[in-house]
């Protein structure tokens, strides 16, 4: 019984969304037959490959080697935090927020395991950072891809329009980092350093496959996943055993939950009576509704009632922070840490960040 209780605590997010699905199934039983069509299977396929590959990178032991190198370059908590914030932001503009997290989170956790300082909050700032950085480009996150294609916005125009949001959001984030992480010297824990022998072959192969896989994801060619799965199955079977398959199941459940929620008649009617003809209302509503149904479903929902792509895009990207459900990238990152405490800590910083960045963005760009 104790083991069961501990397992339920560990998977409380998953069971929470499963419970929501059971309630929705009871309220809307006619939709059950359509559940498979509610899932974005391209996203699930992409996540599957990324989970396998990054598990291989983590298990290779080379993150410990890279961690030692970085700790020689950055001697204080503040300098280390700024480096990881900027790295996360830069990666997310090209590799999307999800892929960036699969790279920086394992590396950060590796560093956290070999220092005496508590830098666990750095993961939270990295999550916010990838949400900020991914807002800049049309390919930075799923909601941008959807809005970019829907209104056929020129690539450079999109970046130019989103650049002011990036500048404002990054400035606030750097202030948060300055407050949270002092210029305190990083002290190493000698007990943990160099306790594993790196697997160079596994590391090199996983890095190469990651680069190729990202390129193939951009061109929507997902069949490479089968090749990747077979290779790891034949040569590194333990990697598949250590892959977080429950995370994939969690995403399937989330897709079904929020597709149903976004199509409920009372929600659609409630949106239709709002004044979404003005940019300020569109921005506020989009940012707030993202907190309830996540920013990707929010972008789809609001686009049915407004053609102001600028306000919608600003709203869903601001709305990616705040509550953990604001962006699926948030769930990915916190799940990767395997820490129960971080879910509460995340909201201690993400909610104030959402409020401050939301108010400032409204004042600067949408104040009537």
Image (cartoon, grey):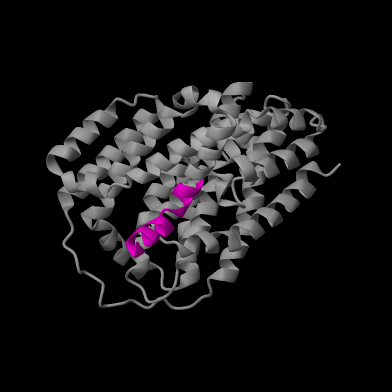
> Quick one: 356 or 237, which is closer to the camera?
237
Q: Quadrant of residue 8?
A: bottom left
In this picture, residue 63 sits left or right of residue 330: left
Q: Position of residue 136 (x, y in %)?
A: 57, 40
Whether residue 326 is visible: yes
How many marks are shown on the rendered structure? 0
Whether residue 143 is visible: no
Residue furthest right as drawn = 368
Query: In the image, what residue occupies the spot 32% across and 34% down?
Result: 213
Q: Is residue 69 above or below residue 293?
A: below
> Quick one: 283 or 136, which is closer to the camera?
283
Write the start and end of the magenta stretch as one range: 1-16
In this picture, residue 18 sits left or right of residue 242: right
Magenta-drawn stretch contains 4? yes
Q: Position of residue 230 (x, y in %)?
A: 19, 33
Query: In the image, what residue occupies the spot 33% across and 68% down?
Result: 113
Q: Quadrant of residue 146?
A: top right
Q: Is residue 163 above or below residue 323?
A: above
> Quick one: 334 or 155, which is closer to the camera?
334
Query: In the image, what residue occupies the spot 60% across and 53% down?
Result: 170
Q: Position of residue 167 (x, y in %)?
A: 64, 49
In this picture, residue 180 sits left or right of residue 2: right
Q: Label the magenta part by its dominant secondary structure.
A: helix
Query: In the image, what residue occupies the spot 45% across and 61% down?
Result: 340
What quarter of the picture does the N terminus occupy?
bottom left
> Quick one: 134 or 281, which is closer to the camera?
281
Magenta-drawn stretch contains 364? no
Q: Position of residue 281 (x, y in %)?
A: 79, 38
């Amino acid at each position: 019984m104790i083991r069961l209780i501990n397992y339920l605590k560990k998977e409380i997010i998953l069971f929470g969304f499963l419970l929501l699905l059971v309630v929705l199934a009871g309220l809307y039983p006619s939709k059950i037959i359509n559940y498979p069509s509610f899932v974005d299977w391209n996203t699930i396929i992409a996540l599957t490959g990324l989970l396998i590959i990054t598990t291989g990178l983590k298990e290779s032991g080379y993150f410990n080697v890279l961690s030692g190198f970085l700790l020689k370059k950055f001697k204080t908590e503040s300098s280390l935090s700024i480096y990881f914030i900027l790295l996360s932001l830069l990666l997310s503009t090209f590799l999307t927020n999800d892929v960036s997290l699969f790279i920086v989170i394992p590396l950060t956790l590796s560093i956290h395991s070999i220092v005496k300082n508590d830098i666990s909050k750095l993961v939270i700032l990295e999550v916010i950072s990838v949400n900020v950085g991914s807002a800049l480009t049309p390919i930075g996150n799923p909601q941008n891809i959807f809005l970019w294609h829907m209104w056929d916005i020129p690539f450079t125009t999109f970046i130019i329009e989103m650049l002011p949001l990036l500048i404002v959001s990054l400035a606030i984030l750097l202030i948060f980092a300055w407050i949270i992480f002092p210029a305190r010297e990083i002290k190493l824990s000698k007990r943990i350093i160099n306790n594993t022998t790196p697997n160079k072959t596994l590391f090199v192969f996983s890095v190469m496959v990651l680069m190729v896989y990202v390129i193939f994801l951009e061109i929507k060619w997902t069949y490479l996943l089968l090749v990747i799965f077979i290779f790891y199955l034949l040569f590194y079977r333990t990697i598949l055993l250590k892959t977080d398959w429950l995370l994939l199941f969690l995403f399937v459940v989330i897709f079904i939950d929020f597709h149903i929620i976004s199509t409920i008649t009372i929600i659609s009617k409630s949106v239709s009576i709002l004044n979404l003809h003005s940019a300020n209302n569109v921005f506020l509503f989009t940012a707030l509704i993202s907190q309830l149904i996540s920013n990707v479903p929010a972008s789809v929902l609001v686009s049915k009632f407004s053609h102001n792509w600028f306000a919608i895009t600003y709203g869903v990207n601001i709305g990616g922070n705040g509550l953990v459900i604001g962006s699926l990238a948030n769930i990915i990152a916190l799940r990767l840490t395997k820490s129960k405490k971080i879910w509460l800590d995340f909201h201690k910083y993400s909610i104030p960040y959402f409020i401050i960045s939301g108010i400032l963005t409204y004042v600067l760009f949408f104040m009537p």
